[in-house]
Structures are given as structure tokens and as C-alpha cells.
Image (spheres, helix red, strand yellow):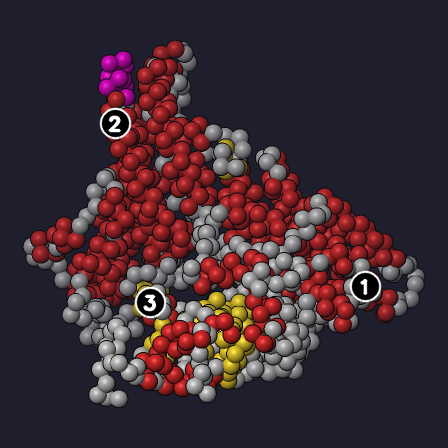
Amino acid sequence: MSSGEVVTMVMKSAVEDDDAGWGLGIPEKMKNNANWVDITHEFKGACKELYLGELLHDKLFGLFEAMSAIEMMDPKMDAGMIGNQVNRKVLNFEQAIKEGAIKVKDLSLPELIGIIDTSFCCLITWLEGHSLAQTVFTCLYVHNPDLIEEPALKAFALGILKVCDIAREKVNKAAVFEEVRNVLQSEDFQAMTYGFKMANNVTDLRVTGMLKDVEDELQRKVKSTRTRQGEQRDPEVEVEHQQFLALFNRIKFTRLLLTALITFTKKETSSVGEAQKLVAQAADLLSAIHSSIQHGIQSQNDTTKGDHPIMMGFEPLVNQRLLPPTFPRYAKIIKREDMVAYFSKLIERIKTVCDVINTTNLHGILDFFCEFSEQSPCVLSRSLLQTTFLIDNKKVFGTHLMQDMIKDALRYFVSPPVLSYKCCLFNNHQAKDYIDSFVTHCSRPFCSLIQIHGHNRARQRDKLGHILEEFATLQDEAEKVDAALHGLLMKLEPQRQHLACLGTWILYHNLRIMVQYLLSGFELELYSMHEYYYIYWYLSEFLYAWLMSTLSRADSSQMAEERIVEEQVKGRSSKKTKKKKKVRPLSKEITMSQAYQNMCAGMYKTMVALDMDGKMRKPQFELDSEQVRYEHRFAPFNSVVTPPPVHYIQFKEMSDLKKYNPPPGSADLYMAASKHFQQAKLILENVPIPDPEVNRILKVAKPNIVVMKLLAGGHKKETKVLPEFDFSAHKYFPVVKII
Amino acid sequence: MATMIEENGPSTHSEVSPSSQARQKLEGLLNKNMRIRMTDGRTLVGLFLCTDRDCNVILGSAQEFLKSTDIFSQGEPRVLGLAMIPGHHVVSIEVEADSLEDTQRFGANR
């Protein structure tokens, strides 16, 4: 049993309300001194007989186990060390009430405001990834709201417990974090609630009701302290008025936030719109909350050395015993000034999440998830997105079948004849079987693909690598179904062709995944500079090349289908249909892919040229092998059949500059790179409605054009100072800076 | 000491040498409950797993008690799991009376 598991086991029993003990009987033994025999002298004497370096231990215990022991009296490992401890008494809620260290009634307005603001800060700190035990549950009031007599505080304590409970439930349901098996591992969300009671004895409705009652009462107070016409303004009453208003806003905010989260748990799609309205109302209160922060009481400074200021009603160490011994003593709680900014961003994210239901096509949803993920959103908003997308893992938004969405996506992308109403295959029994079975097999991988984008960026990359295996299987099946459908169609309707529609669509997604996998490595800063060249090579010369041909094939397939449909319509109606030049659905994607390809090509050539000029730091150690690194970077691609992975030897052959006569020098490569960046710039400047991404790429392309031209002209050729790569404008493409 | 050769298995000498006797005593305590008071006043209770010449002791399933063992104002002990107490921080070591068998009684020679 690992120490972590022992800790988990014992921790579970530790949280009984009554500290009746452990069930291990040891405290009893502890109390009975007569049982223990002092052997200090003899033990130490016996130890001296051991050799230097000799360990005396049981067969089953060795260095491997010994290694994981925490060292006592080492301040870094021994959190409980006396001398490392605080001088104040750490009291729990009940003890604090008994000692009069905490008030449960007759709290002043500043006290209430201060407590609420600190609790909000704790809530935010928890959502950012710290443990409940060191954040929300450092507030003693939430340990047992039944003991609170002050109605506003009681309602608030229950409210915040409910918010935590629902948030936790959502995150668990969405499972956007890894299972925490070993308690000592920290993941991006603490799943354990340490057995804390989350107001389970009170219904959600009751709590919102209590908050509303308090709100109404406070509203009366606000009104009664308002200035009346012609009356002299009493400064004290004015302050009271402001404070009542501050408290009112906070209670209302809590109620709206809670109600919004409750609404998310409802399964009807209309509830998403409702939730959006509620959070918007909550957001309206934020500026008033921000400007009234100063009314709340502040933390008192503890005089013990190096300790945190303690806020009334809070005890940061009250749960220390529930945590593993090597846990840091305190979680850094965010400051009140930052609280409103955080809430405001959170609400923006939640509003964005609510918009997802307006996207009804699969590719659109996938793009939505991708874009949302790029802001690195918090775990709660990611979870809300996941659970809104796939309610109970069954239907998309609770209404659409995944299979139908996939069929729509196929129609949009590649217009396969079998899915066209006008095609004879549409009602062909056998064809239907083929396509339905294929689409059903696609459901799970595509759900997974979308859900992958609900994880944090690092985990996404990892999972994208793994999902390529599933897609390889799909590709295989797609080929078979394509062949079968093609054969069928040839017999039944020879003027129409099925070709490789399904295969094209799967290939498209395959390529997207591979591209994303490689590009995210830049964002996550995984690659060393000397690796850039082969990453960019793989992207520009290989993946994007394939992507371009796949997209154009899909486009042709669409056009072929459109022509046939037009013929059929023309044949029937006598009207002359006016030919309108419509925007091809895939044109934006083709354009962007071309731009990306040029950017990658430019970067590839830049890196090769810099290396030629000796401006690249490479590993020089004896056992170094670029091949090993290369194979590792592209390892997940080995399960892909189409496109076939490019192995190192093959890469070296394909990228060998000596096959040109004469082989290009660095100046030629810089010029070529400059032209690529120029090309990208031209393509992007022609985009009719430029989105932020277009502008971001331009911010990199433009300076790089200039830098490459300078380098081609021999600028700073002799300097051995390494160039800098600035990823601040675009996370995948750096601006190259020559010092 | 330098001339002494470490052997596996029991000593073939008819007279048990003092150093292997010490080892036997210590080995007899392995996996038994042990209570150790540290220099800062805390007490650790756990299973004796390992020690060395400098009397560094490793306890398994260790629990930390803050006050002296007679007064339990803290109530719950803190669970540490696997803990190592450096020899120079050990003030006292105690074992349960039944852990010491008659034949190997520590301090029986007193």
C-alpha cells in the first residue's frame, strides 16, 4: 500500500463529525503509558554496532520505499514542525463560537461585506485549481451554516456551498480532468471534497428562496436610507445606505450565479438561454460590487513570524490535518481587487458557452470548441461547454443524434451522392446499410474529438495524438465503404461518381488533427530551436500539401454534385435559372490553409538557412541522435495509414538540398523564405472579412519579410549571436529577430 | 571493525558476537509499534521499518501527536504516512511491552 493510499484511507475516516478516533485503537494505547517501555539507550547503543551506511530493515522494505519517506524536522517536508507553526490557536467553527472568536449574530455591515468578499475570493481561488480545504472551507461559517443566526450570512453560506456543489458536480460529469488516484498528485482540479458537507440537507430551491428573502429585506433597508427630497444628507445614514446597497448587490449576485448554475443542470435546451440571461444580470452587478469593496473589513495581521493576515471568520489552517503532509501550508487567495475582473471573465466565458447551441453543424461545433479552447478557459466553463454539448452523453444539445449531424457534415463537406435526396442511392437498401453503419462508427470518435477540445491545452495535445489510432480504423472502413458505394453507383447511375467521398472527409479530419498536434507543440513550448526546421517541414511540405489536395478534391466533389442537381432542376423547369457566382463553402478554409502552408515553408527555409550560417545551437553530446528526436516527435503519426508517416531517412532524402543543381546557399533560402512570407501576406490581405487570426498572422509575416530580405543581403552575417524567436504575436509562428 | 567480514546467514561461532546480538535485537523490533519523541516536543507513533548507524528511524503509517502523550488537547493525530526521523532529533524511543520477548529483552542485562 503506497503512503498515498494509506493517507486516503485514513483521511476518509478522519472526517467523521465526532472525533471518536480512528478505529485503529492507537489513541487508547497512546493514553496508557504503562504499556510503553523506554528503550532509547539500548536502541541507540545497538545502532552504534551497525556499520556506516548499513540499513537495518525488513526483507520487504528497501531503498525504493525508504526514498518516499518525508523527513521530519526539515521545514520543506515537515509542514507540522513546531517552530514552523503559528503561535495562534487553530480553532474550528464550534470551538471558535465557544471561545467567542467568531460572531454568528449581530455582525456589522462592514463585517458581512468583508466576509462575503473574502469568500468570493476563496471560491475563485478554488476554481483556479486549489483545494477546497484551503480555499472555500477556510471560511468557518460554511462548515455548519445551521449555527449561523444572522440571516444574510446564513443564506450566503448556504448559497456558496451550493455553488461549489454544483460546480463540482459539473466538472465531475464533464470529466475534463484526469482521475485523481494518488492524493499526493495535483491535477488541474481537486476532485476530493474531503467529506465536507455541501448543504445537502437543504434543497437548491430553499437556498435561492432564502437569498431572495434576504435580498428583499435589504432592498427595504436601502430604500429607507435613501435621501429624500429636500432633506439634509446625514453622512452616517449615507454610509449606511451605501453599505446596505453593497450587501444587497452581493446577495443578489450570489443568487443569480447560483440560479444560473442550477439552470444549467436542467436538461431542456431552453435552459441554456435562460442561464445566459441570468449570468448577464449577474454581470450587471459587478461594477457596483467593485466600487464597494472598501466597505468591507480587512484581514487582521497576525503577529507571528511570516504568517498570513487572518480575516475574521476564516482560519486557513483549520483543515490542515485533512491534507497530505507535504501539501503547501497556504493557498494563495486572490486579492479582492482582482475578484470582480475574474468574475467578469468567467461570466463572459459562460455566455460564450451558451452560444454553442446556435451552431448546429458538426464542423461548426468543432471549430467552436477549438476557438473556445484557445483562450485557455477555466475548468468550470470548459465543463459547462462539455455538458451542454453532450447531455448525459447521448444527444447533442439534448436534441440531435450524432449520426444525423455527421451526415449533415458529410453533405456540407463533400456532398456524397448517397446522401443526396436526388440520388438513386439514397433509397437503396444496401447503400443505406453501408452509410448508416459507417456513420454510426464515426459517432464515438467524433464525440471524443470534440470533447478533447474541452480539456486544457496540454492534455489536448496528448489526447489528439492518441485519437489518431481510432481515426486510422475509420479511414480503413471509409475506404471499404467508398469502394462498395462506388461500385453500386456505377451500376445504377453511371453519370454520377462516388469516388472516395467518405475517405476524403476522414482524411481531412486526420490531417487537421495531425496539424493541430504539431502546431500545439509550439504553443506549449515543447520544441527546441534546432527542431523547428523539421516540424515546419512536415507541416508545409507534407501535411499542408495533403490538406490542400484533400480540400480541392472535396470542392470538386461538391461542384460535381451541384452540377448534377442543376441539370436535374433545369431539365424540369422551363425557367432559366440565373447563374450566380456563390462563395464556395470551403474557400475560406482553402485560403487559410494556403496561408499557413506558406508561413510554415517560410519558417522551414529560415531555420535551414540560419543553420547553414552557424546561427543555430545544436546539441553536441556524444550519444545525440537527431533521428531519435525526430521519431519521437512524430511517433503518434505511425498509426496513420493515409497520409503515410515520413520516417527520418525518408525525410532526409526528401529535404536534401543537394538534389538541386547548384544547391542553394543561405542567401537563396532567405530569399525563398521572404517570398513565402510575402505570399502569405498577399493571400491574407485578400480575405474579404479578416478575423483576428488573419491579423495575427500578418503581424508575423510582415516583419519576417523584411528580416529575411536583410539576411539574404548578408546583414550581420558574421555575428554568431543567436537569433530570437518571438511568439508573442502568434503562438505558432515567431517573428525572427536578429540581434 | 575493519577486519570483520559481513556474512549472510547465522554466525557459525559458538559464542554470539555482540554486534550480531545488537542486530538481532533491532531486527526483533521491526514492524512493531514504536513511539518516538522528537526534539520539538512532537511524538510520532508508527511501525518501525528501518534504522541505521546514526539512529535515523523510518516509521510506517506514522501519526503525529502534538502534545505530550498524557494530555490530548489536540484530539486527532495527524497522519503522515511514511516518515523518517533524523537520529539527532530523537529524544526518546519506546515500544509496547509485549513487543519485547523475554528471550530478547532489551536491557535484560541491566
Tell me the residue at 18%/58% (across/down): A627
Asked where in the image residue A15 lies, by quadrant, the reply is: bottom right
Q: What residue type is labelled 1?
A: Lys
Identify the disc placed on residue A59: 3
- Residue under numbered circle 2: A480
Is A96 or A149 nearer to us in this picture? A96
- Asked whether the residues under the numbered discs 3 and 2 touch, taking CB atoms below 8 Å apart as contact, a structural biologist would say no
Compared with residue A25, is residue A77 higher up or lower down, i.e. above or below? below
Instruction: Judge from the rendering whether residue A631 lies leftward or rightward of residue A102; answer left or right.
Output: left
Q: Position of residue A709 (x, y in %)?
A: 25, 63
- Residue under numbered circle 1: A105
Disc 1 chain ID: A
Asked if the magenta segment contains residue A492, the reply would be: yes
Whether discs 3 and 2 lie on one chain: the answer is: yes
Whether discs 1 and 2 lie on one chain: the answer is: yes
Secondary structure type for disc 3: loop
Q: Label 3, label 2: how many angstroms apart (C-alpha)? A: 59 Å
Residue A633 visible, this orientation: yes
The quarter of the rendered structure image containing the N terminus of chain B is bottom left
Tell me the residue at 54%/76% (across/down): A36
Nearer the observer, disc 1 or disc 3?
A: 3
Q: Where is residue A728 in the image (x, y as percent from the top left)?
A: 40, 62
Q: Position of residue A306 (x, y in %)?
A: 58, 81
Tell me the residue at 22%/48% (across/down): A541
Q: Label 1, label 2: how many angstroms apart (C-alpha)? A: 74 Å
